Every structure is written in structure tokens, then in C-alpha cells.
Image: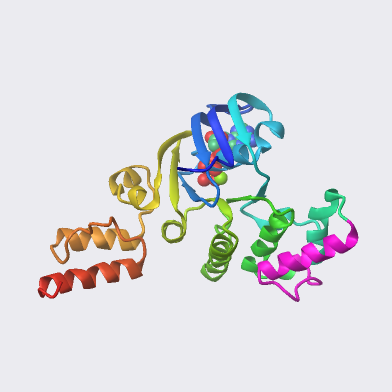
Amino acid sequence: MKTEPLLRVNGVYWHYEEGAMPALVDIHLALYPGEVVGVVGPAAAGKTTLLLTMSGLIPSNYGGQFVGSVESKSEQGIVFQDPETQFIGLTVEEELAFSLENTGWPDERIERRMAEVLDLIGLNGFANRSPLELSGGEKQRVAIASALSHNPQVLILDEPTSELDPVGAREVFSLLSRLKQEKEMTIVVSSHATEELAAFCDRMILIVEGKIVLDQPTREFFAQVDVLDEHGILVPDVIRLYHMLCQEGVMPASSTGVPLTVEELALHYKEGQLVREGSL
Ligand SMILES: Nc1ncnc2c1ncn2[C@@H]1O[C@H](COP(=O)(O)OP(=O)(O)OP(=O)(O)O)[C@@H](O)[C@H]1O
Ligand SMILES: [Mg+2]
């Protein structure tokens, strides 16, 4: 039996004041503790709008017509695409201090929390550095630290790696993997990096023109290559290769579903070889 959801979106319809069309239509979803959810969709599909709605910033901080409800039992931290636009502090320490300013915590507690968060994101020793002088990956890790400073149960990230080079993107996804494994954080992340999402997420949502088209466990989601192709979603190479190898008869279809990583594909291939040789 599943536990109670941390967040529930009930039949939400949202039309930005200036929008030509509704940005969200009839959105229903529930987010459970410890789930890691990826959100994909074409440009202007409503990914950012969906995350703003889950974080509670829509409707409160935006003008428009809102129908439905969002029930939240948790605090959320949100991280946006471009970390620089979020920085207000002159140093990393100041940046984190600002995000803890309204807590009313005593100074020692703030100090302790800042040290914990810097440790968590692997930026010990960065407290006095200017956030603007860090690498892209480090900047985004500082933004994640700010979002985590209040110890939210849910971390929401809108395309956190799209402004980063591949090294920075890997840094951010490996931090997110640590938060998932070590802290059992509940994470919602929109991204075009489907290869990373396939390896990282438990569940995937495809949103198109403000409507949820797919909302499924990651393996079932990525098996639907035709639907993903139809909406221009990049299908990870490992999944394409798997389908090609099955079609060519190089290996049988996997009984456990499509492989989501190179390691899974290699394992499945080896098992196929053993079956062929009659040793399994
Ligand atoms: N502040 C706003 N006012 C009016 N319309 C908006 C506003 N923000 C977004 N929209 C519109 O709402 C729709 C959804 O936008 P949203 O930014 O959520 O899409 P997205 O999937 O995040 O796109 P992208 O891939 O470009 O980040 C678009 O048609 C967009 O033009
Ligand atoms: Mg967006």
C-alpha cells in the first residue's frame, strides 16, 4: 500500500493573463515521498508552468485564471535554469545566509545549517568565494544548496543543466543522485537530457500543449518510442540501439523491459549470448 502523497494536483487549469492559450489543462497528479520524477515536453509545452504550479508559485505569484487545487503536505525548494539570475549574495556564504534569513533561526543554527548544506553539495571550502566566479556546475550546486537550506522535503528543478557544459551537467546529476540515494529526497526535474533522466528517474511525465500525455514508470515510458518521436522528445541512444538490435535479431526482446543504461543493455546482451550458447 502506498503512503500518503506529499503533493496532489487536482484538475488544474491555468491561463496566464497574457497567454494566448491555457498553459495547463486538466492536470491531475500525485507525488509520493521518495519519488524522482522527470518532466519532458516540447518547447512551450508547459514544463516550467507545471513546476511553478507544483511549487505553489502559480497562482500566488502570477496573474491569470486558475481552476482546481494543489494540496501540499510538504515544503518545496525550487531551482531554475540559470543559476546566476538567482544569486544575490557576494559570497557563497552570503547567498546561503539570505535563503535562511526569514527563518528567524539563531546565528549558530544558521552557521551550522550552512556548513551542512555546503558539505552535502560537496562545496566545502567555497563559503567565501563569489558565486559568480564558480564554474557552471558549481553555480548550479550553490543554487541547489540555497533551495535545500530550509530542508524541504521536495526539490523541484526546472532544466537545471541546460545552461551547463557536459561536465557541469554530470556534476549536477551526480549530486541529484546522491540526494536521492542518501537523503531519499523527493525530486521533480524537467530536462531535455533524456539519457540522464532515463538513468535517474523512477517516473516520467510527458507534457504537450499543457496536457499530460504520459505519466508512467520510467521503463514503461521509454518503451513508447513512437509517442516520444511524435512529440520530438529525444529517445536515448541506448534505447534506440536496443530496438535496432532486437529488430535485427541480434538479441531477443528483454522480458524485464527496455534497458535504460548502457550497463543494462550490455547485461541483457550477455544474457542473450548465454541463452544462444545453451548455457542458460
Ligand atoms: N508569464 C507568462 N505570461 C504569459 N504566458 C506565458 C508566461 N509564461 C509562459 N507563458 C506561456 O505558457 C506556455 C507554457 O510555457 P512554459 O514556459 O511553461 O513552457 P516550457 O515547456 O517550460 O517551455 P520551454 O521548453 O521553452 O522552457 C507557453 O505558451 C508560454 O508562451
Ligand atoms: Mg521552461
Residue at the right extreme? 107
Question: Which quadrant of the figure shows ligand 2?
Answer: top right
Q: Quadrant of the C terminus?
A: bottom left
Q: Quadrant of the N terminus?
A: top left
227 above or below 257? above
The answer to which image quadrant residue 270 occupies is bottom left
200 above or below 118? above
* Residue 87 image offset from top left, x and y in percent: 75, 57
215 above or below 234? above
75 above or below 130? above
Is 199 one of the magenta-colored residues?
no
Q: Which residue occupies 61% across, 25% down? A: 66
In-front residue for pair 45/257:
257
Left or right: 203, with 132 as reference point: left
* Residue 275 image offset from top left, x and y in percent: 14, 70
In-front residue for pair 6/245:
6
Q: Which residue occupies 25% across, 61% down? A: 242
Residue interval drawn in magenta: 106-131
Q: How is the image coloured?
A: rainbow
Q: Which residue occupies 31% across, 61% down? A: 259
Residue 90 seen in render: no
Tally of marks: 0
Left or right: 265, with 183 as reference point: left
The answer to which image quadrant residue 60 occupies is top right
Residue at the front extreme? 1
Residue 53 seen in render: yes
Q: Which residue occupies 73% across, 57% down? A: 149
In-front residue for pair 55/31:
31
In-front residue for pair 3/63:
3
* Residue 223 image offset from top left, x and y in percent: 30, 50
